Image (spheres, rainbow, N blue to C red):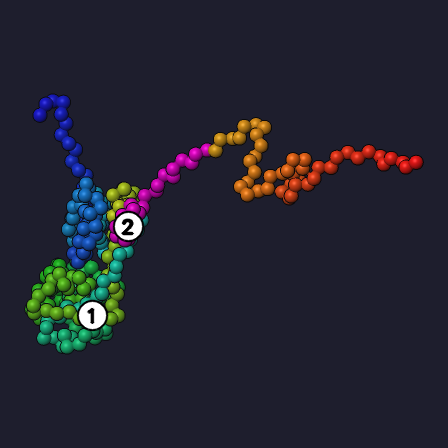
Amino acid sequence: MTGTEKTPAATPSFRLAYVPGATPAKWVRIWNERLPDSPLALVPVAAAEASDVLRRGDADAGLVRLPVDRTFFSAIPLYTETTVVLVPKDHVVAAVEEITLHDLADEIVQHPLDDVMDWERPPGQPAVERPATTADAVELVAAGVGLLVVPQSLARLHHRRDLTYRTITDAPGSDIALAWPEERTTDQVEDLIGIVRGRTVNSSRGRTQTPAPQEKKKPAPSGARKAPARGAARPKPGTKQVGKGKPKPQSGKRGKPRKRS
């Protein structure tokens, strides 16, 4: 390599954070099809750390669980997850298809420190000690120590052969959203917004397009007469055009009538 040659600049990449249970695969596939020259890097983060990762700029946008600080972040809700209760397969709850929160009133329900559910008051009876993580809570449920209420995606993520889950019909859902720092709404963020909103390839960016300049009409030369509209009747010789109506015969000057002798 000579001294005059330059190393090609690295292709800019877009970093998308995602929390456990979020499924970015579909949007990543569309991104790679539409923007092959701008690689998308996935950044797995814990749900509780997602906001800090985005604030620090360690990711450009993220698939996060709501709520987020809307004074700092812009967010587009994508979907709401069903809430389920994770139970041992031999538990009485496993015998039914769905339950209500009232059915858990007398059950010990684990409430991990990283719980992603936005409870005003968690359901059931509290355990003696809160487990540190959802994974720890799953281990306790498998050991027969209480139940666990989570979004359905987390129940699937922590699947075990000795556990199952049932839908809770009246529990609040968990909202997944695309979020990013509002002050850092870049062109690549706009590209991703278009993808998650299902826009076509021609309208996916959502960027403001600059209108094409319109050609100015040249003024007609002074003294030039306007050409008659196509299909309009042309005035005959010896007639005078009056307004927009039909041509009116031009009257000649008449002298005084002669007296007969």
Query: Amino acid under label 1?
Result: Thr
User: Is residue 211 in the magenta section?
Assistant: yes
Q: Is residue 156 visible?
A: yes
Q: Which residue is mark 1?
A: 167
The residue lying at 19 percent from left, 67 percent from top is 84
Residue 54 in percent (x, y) is at: 22, 46
At x 17% / y 53%, what residue is drawn? 25
The image quadrant where one finds the C terminus is top right
Q: Position of residue 152 (x, y in %)?
A: 18, 64
Q: Nearer the viewer, mark 1 or mark 2?
A: 2
Stretch in magenta: 194-216
Report the disc number at residue 200.
2
Q: Is residue 5 within the magenta segment?
A: no
Helix, strand or loop under label 1:
strand
Q: Looking at the image, which is closer to me, 213 or 246?
A: 246
Q: Secondary structure at mark 2?
A: loop
Q: Callout 2: 10 Å neighbours few (<14), some, many (20+)?
A: few
Q: CA distance from mark 1 to mark 2?
A: 35 Å
